[in-house]
Image: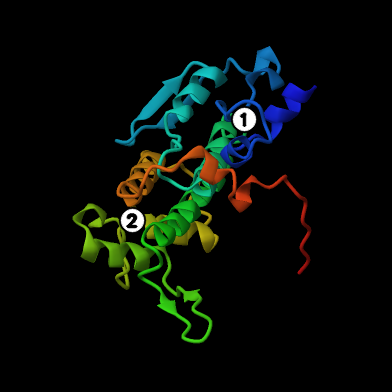
Amino acid sequence: MNNVLDNWDNTWCRYYGGFTQSPPDRLIELDWFRPEVVGMIFCYPDTKGQLKQFSGLEDWHNYVLTLRLKPSKIPLPHIDSFDDALRALVMSYFFSGLSKVAESKALSTLEDALKVAYQHKMCTTDKQTGEHKCHLGLGGILNWLAQQDEFYKDMADTEKGHRRQNALNVIRDKQMHGNQSEVMPWGGLFEKVKQTIEHAFHNWAIYDLEWFRKMPCAEPMQLYSYGI
């Protein structure tokens, strides 16, 4: 029973914090599902927009595993957040609409990761409290970064009027503003987000396990409830 609980909500934060015995090697447990439902053929667009066929849930899950970020330089909360996006992507095998949920989570993870990686340099700072006040959205952040690093060139389009539909900020804006025409998944989006986060942290020092044992994310999971 303990092994089941360890794998139920295992994260890199919990593992490095010493609260689970094994690392989160999988995004889901394949034996949670009945054999008759995990052998369906599944198709998903590749980086060129061509449909790639997978022989079943295990084949699809193994592919999504290749999209994961690895603990080394990237802060663990960002890795866990991207894993949540990939977990939703895996489950799109059963419910196709979850691919859009996964994309939205991946892009929000990217936005937060970029702010942290560049130490909020694109943000303003409150003179009294010293807190960062970043009024830029993903498009503004990527435009700021494009002025510092050629790697980020053409990732965003913040022009008024007709914008490039495959710009990362345009994809996110259409989803966040409830554009119901956004139903098909974007091939290559998770690869692009993965590469961008890895690049953002490529100059960061490799962290050590003992330091992360002291991080707030390593605290035991608590339940919170919010009301509107």
User: Type of residue at label 1?
Assistant: Phe
Label 1, residues with CA under 10 Å away: few <14, some 14-19, many ≥20:
some
Is residue 100 positioned above or below 55 on the image? below
Q: How is the image coloured?
A: rainbow
Position of 54 compared to 9: left or right?
left
In x, y percent, where is residue 79? 50, 43
Determine whether the residue tagged by mark 2 lies in a helix, strand or loop. loop
Q: CA distance from mark 1 to mark 2?
A: 28 Å
Residue at image point 57% right, 34% down: 92
**Displayed quadrant of residue 90:** top right
* Along the line of sight, the residue nearer the viewer: 205 or 2: 205
Position of 137 compared to 21: left or right?
left
User: Can residue 16 be seen in this snapshot?
Assistant: yes
User: Can residue 96 be seen in this snapshot?
Assistant: no
User: Type of residue at label 2?
Assistant: Ala
The answer to the question of whether label 1 and label 2 lie on touching residues, with beta carbons closer than 8 A, is no
Determine whether the residue tagged by mark 1 lies in a helix, strand or loop. loop
* Along the line of sight, the residue nearer the viewer: 168 or 84: 84
In x, y percent, where is residue 210? 54, 41
Disc 2: which residue: 167
Disc 1: which residue: 94
Mark number, residue 160: none
Which quadrant of the figure contains the C terminus?
bottom right
